[in-house]
Image (cartoon, rainbow, N blue to C red):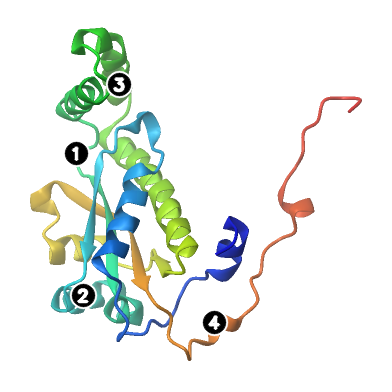
Amino acid sequence: MNTFSDALLWRYATKKFDPTKKLTQEQLDYLMNAGRLAPTSFGLQPFKILVITDQKTKEQLSPAAFNQPQIIDSSAVFVLAANKSGLRAEDVDSFITLVSQTRGVPVDSLAGFRQTLLDFSTRATTEQQIEWIKKQLYIVLGVIISAAAMSAIDSCPMEGFNPSEVDKVLGLEALGLTSAVLLSVGYRATDDKYSQAKKVRKPISELFIPIATPGE
């Protein structure tokens, strides 16, 4: 892709993947690193992302996604999953340790930041925290989709699935996780009619409302 805009124009929610074309491990690593570097609130990342390439597992997962062919025919399925317990004190402490190690600063110097995070975590119920985490995962989803498009990798974000069934198939409850959104990645089939459809989007003049300084 020559530009980011070219990539966004090229991509679409791929409905039919070519099951004979697989992403390389290098390509999967690239997408995973894009997800790792995606912006999230405070940088906490209270979630996990499962990357499923095993065909048998994808077949087991398919009924939970209403047998949509993207699950089975794609090269891989990313399952973005939130911490089921929300944001815990141990998550905050682990993050503070990581900040200290990464930036070479004493843990004690981060005490105020740590308390801010703890205060934030106690102001919301577990359900509210999970919803907050899922919002972070949608930011990650967008970054992975965009990174894929920049490398001419097709993708299809998927909300059409039964979370409890996906969690059961993948054993997410035992991992303290709950599925939020799925992303199938791979290469489009040559006969996917949607690949040739023009992208339908509102014009900028209808979508954005400029708030300018009076007189400008």
Asked whether the residues under the numbered discs 3 and 1 touch, taking CB atoms below 8 Å apart as contact, a structural biologist would say: no
State the CA–CA distance, disc 4 to disc 1.
Answer: 39 Å
Of tags 4 and 1, the one toward the viewer is 4
State the CA–CA distance, disc 3 to disc 2.
Answer: 37 Å
Amino acid type at mark 2: Lys
Asked whether the residues under the numbered discs 3 and 2 touch, taking CB atoms below 8 Å apart as contact, a structural biologist would say: no
Asked whether the residues under the numbered discs 4 and 3 touch, taking CB atoms below 8 Å apart as contact, a structural biologist would say: no
Left or right of 39? Residue 36 is left
- Residue nearest the observer in this picture, 97 or 58: 97
| Element on which disc 3 rests | helix
Sequence-earlier tag: 4 or 1? 1
Query: Disc 4 designates what residue?
Result: 194
Image coordinates for residue 179, horizontal then vertical, percent: 26, 55
Asked whether the residues under the numbered discs 2 and 4 touch, taking CB atoms below 8 Å apart as contact, a structural biologist would say: no
Sequence-earlier tag: 2 or 1? 2
Amino acid type at mark 3: Leu
Query: Disc 2 designates what residue?
Result: 58
